[in-house]
Image: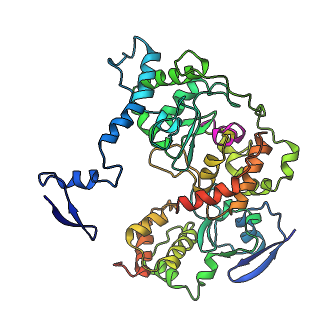
């Protein structure tokens, strides 16, 4: 059985079992290894990707739920050589310590900025709440997002 | 005498006594007929029942104490009886209601439901917001359990004793026994035919990590199998749909958390999931309107 999903702007006909969580399809079949497996229970946000403009936990998103929908992963934000605006701000503020949570942080923040280009700090904090960083770099992550949002960094 | 004041951009000619503090004017100057105070006497005649003359002591008569706490301070019936058009509680009480898009289950068949409650279950649920056998307090019930956590244990035990007695017929609100519910599968075995339902694959990816019988999460705090969850066994899909769409937000100190799926699953998929869990896992008759309910509750509770 085939599931048709647009991933980072490109239509894919995916052959995986529709009961497979999106995260495994992204990492194991499409080799998009940005999104990480953290807890597998929607509690940490390391696997966050954008589906139809909204941040979701890809570890809990069935492939069967994605027919005809559009997925964006952190790979769509930029590359190591040419980082996107938000990625550049994360680098500037040295927001990553171990870096495991960062792909999820970037995609969740990008979804907010796409919908609301100039969120307040309170909106950013509330929006980012589901994503955890166990190194404790939240303040740097916040500063990076605020810079792109145009607030006082 | 008239006082002209602009309130929220609209000029008002206020008739109230100029000695009235603004707060009372804002709150009490209601639209007709709500501003016609004598109507309250009529409402009181219909619905006001004078309170207890003396508060029953904790030790003397736990059941009376429980009745007092449930009917008076707890006013459990405000949600669990439902209200009529005039805002009065429906009679007989505790037949179940709906509040803020959540189902407040009937309290008259706690011991006779498909997954029977015990008094100990009820005490754990009311005080801790979680019954390992039935599920977690959600929606408007959650703040109730958070407050009850601060109430002396003996009082919550008295409330539970009274609530259990509503079913067993020893209290004044005794009602006829509930119609027999379909028996819940004894253990968490998944019936073979359930695997063919379209919701099975959604469950495998989205839910099984925590809710499958073999999931490690099931062994933490003795979580209930979904087959015995109150939200799954409810007469209406409201609480199941609410929980799937909006999850259970994590709050400091709480034991319970579930991520939201509103942005992951469509209304049709929520309904597929409901059919799988309700008929496939719990062996109950399907809810007829889960997809419509999902569309409605999704709109009513914006993200």
Q: Residue at x 76, y 37 (%)?
A: B188
Q: Position of residue B52 (x, y in %)?
A: 36, 21
B16 relative position to B203: left or right:
left
The residue at the far top in this view is B60
Q: Is residue B261 visible?
A: no
**Number of marks in the rendered image:** 0
Q: Is residue B165 left or right of residue B11?
A: right
Q: Which residues are magenta?
A: B221-232
Task: Answer whether residue B249 is magenta in the image.
Answer: no
Quadrant position of residue A44: bottom right
**Residue B223 included in the magenta stretch of the image:** yes
Q: What residue sits 67% from the left and 25% below the top? A: B112
Q: Is residue B4 left or right of residue B201?
A: left
Q: Compared with residue A79, is residue B211 higher up or lower down, i.e. above or below?
A: above
In the figure, B20 relative to A12: above or below? Answer: above
Query: Would you place residue A18 above or below residue B187 in this image?
Result: below
Q: Position of residue A58 (x, y in %)?
A: 66, 65
Instruction: Name which residue lies at 55% across and 49% down.
Output: B257
Instruction: State which quadrant residue B189 falls in.
Output: top right
Q: Position of residue A140 (x, y in %)?
A: 42, 71
Q: Is residue B198 left or right of residue B156?
A: right
Could you tell me residue B293's position as x and y percent? 65, 54
Q: Is residue B128 visible?
A: yes
Residue at point 28%, 67% (across, down): B8
In depth, the one of B210 and A70 nearer the eye is A70
As rendered, which of B236 and B255 lies closer to the eye?
A: B236
């Amino acid at each position: 059985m085939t599931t048709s999903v647009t991933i980072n702007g490109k239509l894919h006909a995916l052959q995986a079992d529709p009961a497979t969580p999106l995260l495994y399809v992204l990492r194991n079949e499409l080799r998009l290894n940005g999104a990480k497996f953290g807890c597998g229970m929607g509690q940490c946000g390391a696997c966050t990707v954008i589906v139809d403009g909204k941040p979701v936990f890809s570890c809990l998103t069935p492939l069967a739920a994605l027919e005809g929908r559009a997925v964006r992963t952190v790979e769509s934000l930029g590359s190591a050589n040419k980082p996107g605006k938000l990625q550049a701000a994360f680098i500037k503020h040295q927001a990553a310590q171990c870096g495991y949570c960062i792909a999820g942080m970037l995609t969740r923040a990008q979804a907010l900025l796409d919908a609301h280009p100039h969120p307040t700090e309170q909106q950013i904090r509330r929006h980012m709440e589901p994503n955890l960083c166990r190194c404790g770099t939240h303040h740097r992550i916040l500063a990076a997002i605020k810079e792109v949002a145009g607030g006082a960094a | 005498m008239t006082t002209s004041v602009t309130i929220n951009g609209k000029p008002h000619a206020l008739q109230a006594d100029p000695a009235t503090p603004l707060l009372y004017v804002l709150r009490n100057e209601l639209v007709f007929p709500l501003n016609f105070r004598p109507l309250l006497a009529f409402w009181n005649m219909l619905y006001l029942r004078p309170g207890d003359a003396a508060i029953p002591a904790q030790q003397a008569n736990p059941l009376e104490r429980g009745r007092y706490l449930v009917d008076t301070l707890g006013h459990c019936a405000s949600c669990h009886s439902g209200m009529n058009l005039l805002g009065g509680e429906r009679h007989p009480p505790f037949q179940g209601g709906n509040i803020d898009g959540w189902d407040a289950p009937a309290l008259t068949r706690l011991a006779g439901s498909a997954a029977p409650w015990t008094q100990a279950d009820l005490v754990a649920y009311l005080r801790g917001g979680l019954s390992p056998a039935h599920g977690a307090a959600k929606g408007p019930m959650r703040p109730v359990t958070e407050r009850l956590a601060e109430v002396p244990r003996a009082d919550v035990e008295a409330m539970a004793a009274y609530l259990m007695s509503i079913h067993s017929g020893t209290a004044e609100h005794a009602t006829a026994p509930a119609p027999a519910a379909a028996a819940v599968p004894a253990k968490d075995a998944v019936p073979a035919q359930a695997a063919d339902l379209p919701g099975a694959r959604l469950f495998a990816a989205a839910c099984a990590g925590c809710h499958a019988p073999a999931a490690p999460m099931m062994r933490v705090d003795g979580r209930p199998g979904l087959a015995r969850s109150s939200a799954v066994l409810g007469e209406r899909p409201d609480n199941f749909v609410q929980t799937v769409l909006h999850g259970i937000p994590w709050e400091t100190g709480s034991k319970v958390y579930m991520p939201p799926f509103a942005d992951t699953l469509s209304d049709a998929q929520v309904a597929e999931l409901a059919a799988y869990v309700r008929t496939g896992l719990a062996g109950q008759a399907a809810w007829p309107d889960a997809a419509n309910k999902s569309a409605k509750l999704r709109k009513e509770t914006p993200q």
